[in-house]
Image: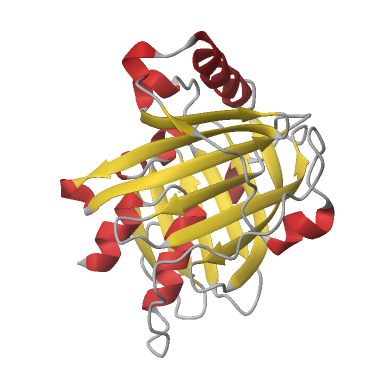
Amino acid sequence: MPFVRTVLAALSLSMLAGTALAQNDPAGAPAPPTRPPVQQTPASAGDVPPPEFVASGQPLEIDTHPVNPSALTAADKATLDQIDTYFNNIKFFSGEFVQVGSDGKRITGKFWVSKPGRMRFDYDAPSPLQLLADGTSVAVRNRKLNTQSLYFIKQTPLRFLLADKLDLIEDSKVLEVGREPAGISVVLQEGSAASGGKSRIQLTFPAPAYDLKQWTITDPQGYDTTVTISDIDRKLQLPDRIFFIDQQKILK
């Protein structure tokens, strides 16, 4: 089924949610596979994007170049090592997100992550969606219809983003790397014929903090979804109960 194949190719719970929302909206036809309009670079080199730009959910422009993972330059390896270190130093973080689909629709919400393996995305009304990862499974919940779909984390690229330890070279296929005064970025390839095709994932870390601020997923059909995160809290330790998945398809 196309829906299942797209879900299995998705980067994150937010991409899963976008797919689920489209399936439950029979009146909405897919938009052509185009990227959201590109705006001028949001800030001068070395600056964090301003709040209004983050809220817009538009792509953060960091140029990348193709790489051969088996013959990396010292500079590209240093960039990938920096990204690995960033993820490996994070255990808990939460914040707000803006998701923009290829049709330009903008959805907001809040998220929580507790590594290894646990994540929760709560979409703001009128979206009925809630997404959970409990360390083993991923649940895409529709609170309006009282239903949910379940997947194994290993069926999605969540397996490396929520891993206790990450090594991009070993755990994924790196296609492109970029470093500019404005920040660093990496483009990964995920998926296979068995999961419905290959997706491209671009992770972007603006200077000077080099914290993850945005990812853009291009699915096997060429559709883009961009997720921008903000108001990050990395100190709050999260209770396991907020990631609990009721294995019943009908929600209580």
Tell me the colour scheme of the image. secondary structure
Quarter the N terminus occupies: bottom left
User: Which residue appears at 16% of the width and 48% of the height?
Assistant: 194
- From what the image shows, is residue 109 above or below residue 234? below
User: Which residue appears at 37% of the width and 87% of the height?
Assistant: 26
- Is residue 12 toward the left or the right of residue 85 in the image? left
- From what the image shows, is residue 126 above or below residue 159? below
User: Which residue appears at 62% of the width and 59% of the height?
Assistant: 38
Looking at this view, is 46 or 160 the one in front? 46
Whole-percent x and y of residue 81? 54, 16
Q: How many marks?
A: 0
- Is residue 154 toward the left or the right of residue 110 in the image? left
- From what the image shows, is residue 134 above or below residue 69? below
Residue 63 visible (yes or no): yes
Location of residue 100 (image quadrant): bottom right
Looking at this view, is 128 or 156 the one in front? 156
- Is residue 162 toward the left or the right of residue 24 in the image? right
- From what the image shows, is residue 60 above or below residue 247? above
Q: Please, which residue is most extreme toward the top here?
A: 74
Whole-percent x and y of residue 231? 79, 47
